[in-house]
Image: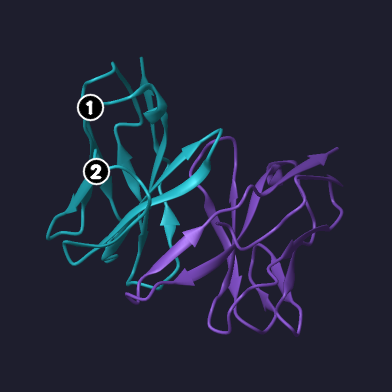
Chain colours: A cyan, B purple
Amino acid sequence: KAGVTQTPRYLIKTRGQQVTLSCSPISGHRSVSWYQQTPGQGLQFLFEYFSETQRNKGNFPGRFSGRQFSNSRSEMNVSTLELGDSALYLCASSLLVRETQYFGPGTRLLVL
Amino acid sequence: DAKTTQPPSMDCAEGRAANLPCNHSTISGNEYVYWYRQIHSQGPQYIIHGLKNNETNEMASLIITEDRKSSTLILPHATLRDTAVYYCIVRVILNTGFQKLVFGTGTRLLVSP
């Protein structure tokens, strides 16, 4: 069974732009969570989606948003990019909520 | 805030057992302990998890103390490919019924020849 896939793997943007990242969960998995990893803050929870609804959100500004489609694929969007948004963005999927999460390889975003 | 504390780094000789400790003194009765590892900025890889009893799978063993305030991940025969940052995580169940993994700073394990 294929693992979690994320696209693109690498991305370079400039300040003020917006970006959309995509995540395809493991087949059959219905819950998708997003995390941000930076050298200074480590791995931090962004939000979780289940059945196309955001179920929980971490402590991030409203510039960070996401959505989930009926096939469980998810996207996250960051608007008005700031230099501090440079990070590795990780997506994790689980079969259902409160099940083990499996991570994708991440999208590395560089904001110049 | 992370509910776990781990040593920042550990060394292990190839072929020997690696024992990675973790303290989680504020863990609640229904909260699981999860272990992941991350190799050179790849996505974290799931290793094992447990609630009360010791667990073993093809990758590792997890020993949880009877009071559940600490645990140890054991890699029985460490290889160079086990060099990674190991995260011990308490899975928090929110009042919505959904979960959140709260990562700490992890232990950087270096396996040497």
The answer to whether A32 appears left or right of B108 in the picture is left
Residue A26 seen by the camera: no
Name above or below for residue A52 compared with residue A22.
Answer: below
Residue at figure coordinates x 84%, y 58% from the top left: B17
Please tell me how crowded label 1 is: few (under 14), some (14-19), or many (20+) other residues with Cα within 10 Å: few
Quadrant in which the C terminus of chain A is drawn: top left
Residue B15 horizontal/vertical position (percent): 84, 51
Residue at figure coordinates x 24%, y 38% from the top left: A63
Of the residues shown, which amino acid type is indicated by label 1? Thr
Residue B99 horizontal/vertical position (percent): 40, 69
Front residue of this view, candidates A58 and B49: A58
Residue at figure coordinates x 79%, y 62% from the top left: B76
Residue at figure coordinates x 71%, y 69% from the top left: B61
Q: Are marks 1 and 2 on the same chain?
A: yes
Please tell me how crowded label 2 is: few (under 14), some (14-19), or many (20+) other residues with Cα within 10 Å: few
Q: Which residue is mark 1?
A: A80
Of the residues shown, which amino acid type is indicated by label 2? Gly
Q: CA distance from mark 1 to mark 2?
A: 11 Å
Sequence order check, earlier mark of 1 and 2: 2
Q: Secondary structure at mark 2?
A: loop
Q: Secondary structure at mark 1?
A: loop
Q: Which disc, if any, is residue A62?
A: 2
Residue A99 seen by the camera: yes
Name above or below for residue A108 compared with residue A89.
Answer: above
Residue A21 horizontal/vertical position (percent): 26, 37
Q: Residue furthest left?
A: A70
